[in-house]
Amino acid sequence: MNAELLSLWAALIGYVVAGTIAIFGAVFRKSPEKTVLLILLCGVLLHTLALGLRWVRLGYGPFTNMYEILSSNVWSLFVFFLLIYWRIKAIRPLSPFIIPFLFMMLAWLMMVPAMDTSLPPTYDTIWLYVHIGFGKIFFGALMIATGLAVVILCREFEFFNRLTNALPGSGSLDELASRMILLALVFDSLMLVAGGIWAQDAWGRYWAWDPLETWSFVTWLSLGFLVHFRITFPRLPWVYATLTLCVFVVSFMTFFGLPFINTIPHKGAV
Amino acid sequence: MILHTLSSLKTTLLALAVLGVGIAIILGDIASSTTALAPALSLLFINLLVAIFVSEKIKRDFWLLVFHLSLLILIILVSASRLIYMKGWVELTEGQYFDGVSGILHQGPLYKDQTDQFRFQQLDFYTTFQTEVLDKTYSRVRVSQEERSEDVIIRDQLPLVLNGYRFSISSHLGFAPTFSWQTDSEINLGEVYLPSYLYNSTGQALEWNLPGTNLSIWTMLDFDENVVSEFFKKPDSFTVIVRVEDQRYEMKIGDTIKLSEGRLTLTKLKHWIGYEVFYEPLMAWILAVCITAIVSLSIFLWNKWGRQSWLKPGDEPTAPLSTSSAQAASSTRTLVKKETF
Ligand code: HEM
C-alpha cells in the first residue's frame, strides 16, 4: 500500500476511534474529551497528509470526481467539528448527534473508487479555492446547526433524555443554532458571489440558472427564509428546528446529490 | 394598516415563498427566469422599501439598515440589468474582422447594439488536448482603437473586454472551407462554418445557399486522421464533398466546379473559433452591492453576538456530566465572556 492510501486509512481509523469514544463518553457520562481531541487532531493531520500527497502526485487538488470531493468534504467537516469541539466546550455532548452523520460520509467515501482524473481548463483559477473554501465553512456551520436542531427535536421524546440532558437548555441551543444558520447564510452568500465571479470568467456569464446554480439559490433562499421565520415566530423553536433539518437536506442534495446526478449543465462539477 | 402589512415580516416570508415558486417555474422550464421572478421580486421590493422606512428595528441598527438597503438596491440593479443585457455568440476564422455577433441567445428589451463602436481581428489560436479532451485555449486577436493596434491573448479565464462587451472562449472550434464564387459580373468569397468539431466530429456537413441564386449546396469535410491528439490541427489530407442538386463532387484545394450560374472554387480550409459574447454593464455594480451587503451583515452579526453569549445564564445541563464539559457549561460567567458564538 502506498503512503497516500496508508495515511488516508490511518486517518479514517483515527476518525472512527475518536468518534466512537466521543459517543461512548456522552452515553456513559465519562470524560474522554482530551483523548477525543487528540485522536481527532491526528486523524485530521493524517488526512491532510493523504490529500497533500495526492495533490503533489497529480498536480492539482481534490476538486474533480466524487472520490476527491467526498474526501475533501469529509476532511473539512471533521476540521469544523474539531474546532467546535475544542472551542465550544458546553456542546461537546453534541457528538452523538453529529458523529453518526460524519460516519455515514466516511462509509460513502470508502465505497467510492479512488480514481484519478484530469483537471478541466476552467479550474485553473484562484476563485476555485475561494468558492470551495467558503462552501466548506457554510456546510460545516449548517451541520452544527442541524445537530443542535436534532437535539431540540429529540427533547420531545423521553427516550433521548440521557443524551440530551448533558447539553444546555433548548433556549440556548436554539440561539446557537440560529447563529450557525446566520454564519451559514453569510458564507453561502460569499460562495455564490465567488462562484459568480468564476463563472463570469470561465463561461462568460455569472449566472445562468443551470440546475446546480438554481439549487444553490434555493439553498440560499431557504436560509433567508429560516432566518426570517425565527424573527417572525420566535416562539416556535421546534418548527424552526424542523425547518433547519429541511434546509440541511436541500443543501446536502445541492452539494452531494446534484453534481453527480446531473453532470453536464454545470461545467464546474464535471 | 396597509403600511403595516406591507412592511410586515410575514409579508417577507410570503415573498420569499413566492420567490421559491418562481424558481420552481424556472426549474420546470415553464417560463423565462425574468417572468418567473418578477412577481416575487416586486413584492420583496415593496416589502423592503416600506420596512426600511417603517421598521424601528431596521432603522435602529446602522449595519442592519445598510444590509437591507443593499438588498433593495440589488433588486433594482438586477431588474435594470435584465432590461439592457445581451448574451450571444460569435465564430471567427483566422484573419477575420469582428463585425457584430453571429447570434443572440437572450437580450433585454432595451438592449442597444453597440458592437460597431470597436473593432478587432482574429489572428491565430492555439489549443492543447489531453486524451482528446480540450485542455487549454489561447487565442490571439488584434484590437484597433484610435489609430493604435495591439495584439491581445484571450485565454480560458481571461476574456477580451471591449466597450463593456466580454468575449470568452466558448470551447467551440471548427473547420471552415473557403470558396470563391465567380459569375459573369462579380466574384464573392465566402466561408462555410461547419458544425463545432468537438461536439460533432462525425457530422462535418452543412447545407447553404449560393449568394444570388436558388442553388442549395451541401458541403462535407471528409478526412481520416486524428486532428485533436495534441492540438487542434488541420488534416494533412482531406476532401471536400459538395452536392449540388443530384450531382456529387469531390474537391481538393484549388479545384473548381462549373455550374450553370458560375464557377465555384475551393480556395482554402480554415479553422474557426467560437466566443461567448456577454454585455452586462451593471455587473461591477451588482458585485459591489453584493459585497456591501455581505460585509454589513457580517458587522451587524459580529456586534450583536459580541453583546450577548448564546448560552443564557442558568441554562446549564439538567444532568451534568462529571466532566470538564459540565464544568464548562455550568460556569456560565466565563463562557459569556469567552464564547460569543
Ligand atoms: C432575501 C432577503 C432578505 C434577507 C436575506 C434578510 C436577512 C436578514 C438578516 C440576516 C437579519 C438579521 C437577523 C438576526 O438578527 O437574527 C435580518 C433582520 C431583519 N430583516 Fe431581513 N432579510 C431579507 C429581507 C427582508 C425584508 C424584505 C424585510 C422587510 C420587512 C426584512 C426585515 C427585517 C427586519 C425587520 C429585521 C430585524 C429583525 C430583528 O432584529 O428583530 N428583511 N434580515
Image (cartoon, coloured by chain):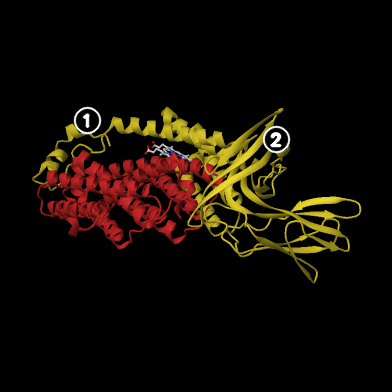
Chain colours: A red, B yellow
Q: Nearer the viewer, residue B127 or A132?
A: B127
Question: What amino acid type should be assigned to the residue bearing mark 2?
Answer: Phe
Q: Quadrant of residue A101?
A: bottom left
Disc 1 element: helix
Disc 2 element: loop
In percent of width and height, residue B328 lies at 15, 39
* Marks 2/1 same chain: yes
From the image, state whether disc 2 or disc 1 is nearer to you: 2
In percent of width and height, residue A116 lies at 37, 56
Q: Of marks 2 and 1, which one's residue comes earlier in the chain? A: 2
Q: Nearer the viewer, residue B195 or B311?
A: B195
Q: Quadrant of residue A186?
A: top left
Q: CB of residue at label 1: within 8 Å of ligand 1?
A: no
Tell me if residue B75 comes above or below residue B224 in the rendering: above
Label 2 crowding class (10 Å Cα cut-off): few <14, some 14-19, many 20+?
some
Question: What amino acid type should be assigned to the residue bearing mark 1?
Answer: Lys
Report the residue marked by disc 2.
Answer: B118
Is residue B133 at all visible to an observer of this figure? yes
**Pointer 2 indicates a residue of which chain?**
B
Q: Quadrant of residue A171?
A: top left
The reply, left or right, for residue B136 in relation to residue A90 is right
What's the mark number on residue A10?
A: none
What's the mark number on residue B337?
A: 1
In percent of width and height, residue A119 lies at 43, 50
Is residue A144 at all visible to an observer of this figure? no
Label 1 crowding class (10 Å Cα cut-off): few <14, some 14-19, many 20+?
few
Quadrant of image for the N terminus of chain A:
bottom left
Give the distance between the C-alpha atoms of the residues marked 2 and 1, in whole angstroms.
61 Å
Residue at 91% of width from left, 51% of height from top? B185
Q: Are marks 2 and 1 in contact (CB under 8 Å)?
A: no
Q: Quadrant of ligand 1?
A: top left
Residue at 49% of width from left, 39% of height from top? B7
